[in-house]
Image (cartoon, rainbow, N blue to C red):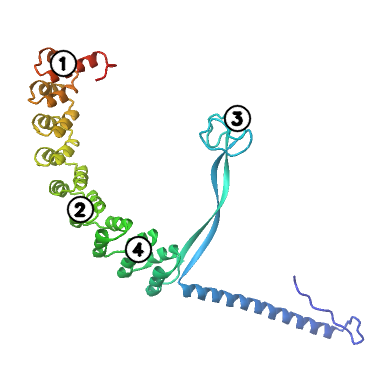
Amino acid sequence: MQETCPAALSVDGTVGTSQPQSHRNRRNCQARLRMRHVLMVSWGLVALFVMTSLCCTSGYRIHRTKTIVKHYVVVCSNCGKRVSTGLPTCPHCGAHFTNFTTFQRSGIGVSEFDQVQEASSRVEITTNDQAKIAVIATTNPDPAVRAEAASYLSDQTVLRSIASADQDQWVRHRAVGAIRDQTILIDLARNASYYNVRSDALERIKDESVLTDLARTANYPGVRVRAVQRIKNQAILADLATSVSDSSVVEGAIERITDKVILADLATKPASQLVRSLAVRKITDEKALADIAASDSSPEVYQSAIARLRDQKVLADIARQARDPQRRIAAIRKLFDREVLSDLSRHEKDPSVRTEAEQRLQYLVRPQILY
């Protein structure tokens, strides 16, 4: 409320009309008001200075906000009480539900929004002093503050310590994200105790020779597999598939190979049955599949090749001429040529092959009969 100046009084106590005395009182009152305003502004500036000084001393500022978030809920339009989705009837009043959508009323079920107040905060680092930031990143009790401070750090040794030892996953993630030293990243990917640190460090390694070494020698199986998944060089992947004993690494390497020539070599040459069977699953060339189906000694490999064959002539040749019955039976199960099946069912000497041909022929005539 605006302060007013008192009226001038005469000597005998009545309201005076003396112009000089009235002007003098008014000037004194205005001076006091100006002084009060100056003091208020001064105190405000002092408070602002103190708050800024405190903020600069701490090195960070936290901005806190509250927002209203709308959550979708379902209520019964008969009784108005909340219900779970997917119920046939209301558990409160027994009314039958019909299908309803998020924003439409349909039958008994209706939808509404529940407003919930949620608090959020944002951390701001207000200092460029690396020593002060390091102290914040390592000692502040708030994980959000430590994480934000870690992202501003440039000291690679401190970042490595935070990534290795901090108890909060997000702080460790931000610390690894700020590391630029490849030697530290390699060491963390190989030896860090926390899985997320090893994974984050591995994602930041680009050198495929380093990734190859990790795929061969890392102590943790997850690191070896993830290292293979980040290699693109087809020759390196083929070498890993044939020289590493870890089946997970072998499978990951072959999964990454797209070169058809390399896949064909892996499907026929390696001594490892696992390598050949995994490579066959990625081959689409009918001639290569036919050669593998007719010549490979491993049942798992040749059955996988036969399962991928589509050429009925090749399948018929295998069903008639292959030496071992299991190979012939696998080909018969892929045949649609009734003439070939009929011939095998009447003239085949091996009873297992003859029975398989008869059952396949019956299935083609009457598909409801399964064998």
- Residue 311 visible in rendering: no
Mark 3 nearby-residue class (10 Å; few <14, some 14–19, many ≥20): some
As shown in the figure, which amino acid type bears the numbered disc 2? Answer: Ala
Q: In the rendering, which numbered label is found on residue 341?
A: 1
Which residue is nearer to you in this view: 25 or 155? 155
4 or 3: tag closer to the N-terminus: 3
Q: Quote the CA–CA distance across marks 4 and 1.
A: 67 Å
* Residue lying farthest to the front in this orientation: 351
Give the mark toward the camera: 4 or 1. 1
Q: Quote the CA–CA distance across marks 4 and 3.
A: 56 Å
Q: In the rendering, which numbered label is found on residue 26?
A: none
Residue on which the image places disc 2: 215
Q: Quote the CA–CA distance across marks 1 and 2.
A: 49 Å
Residue 96, position in %: x, y? 58, 28
Residue 157, position in %: x, y? 30, 69
Q: Quadrant of the C terminus?
A: top left
Label pair 4/3, CB-CB below 8 angstroms: no
Q: Quote the CA–CA distance across marks 2 and 3.
A: 61 Å
As shown in the figure, which amino acid type bears the numbered disc 3? Answer: Ala
Residue on which the image places disc 3: 95
* Residue drawn 9% across the image and 41% down it: 271
* Residue lying farthest to the bottom in this orientation: 11
SS under mark 3: loop
1 or 3: tag closer to the N-terminus: 3
Q: In the rendering, which numbered label is found on residue 175?
A: 4
User: Where is 371 relative to 64, above or below?
Assistant: above
As shown in the figure, which amino acid type bears the numbered disc 1? Answer: Leu
Give the mark toward the camera: 4 or 3. 3
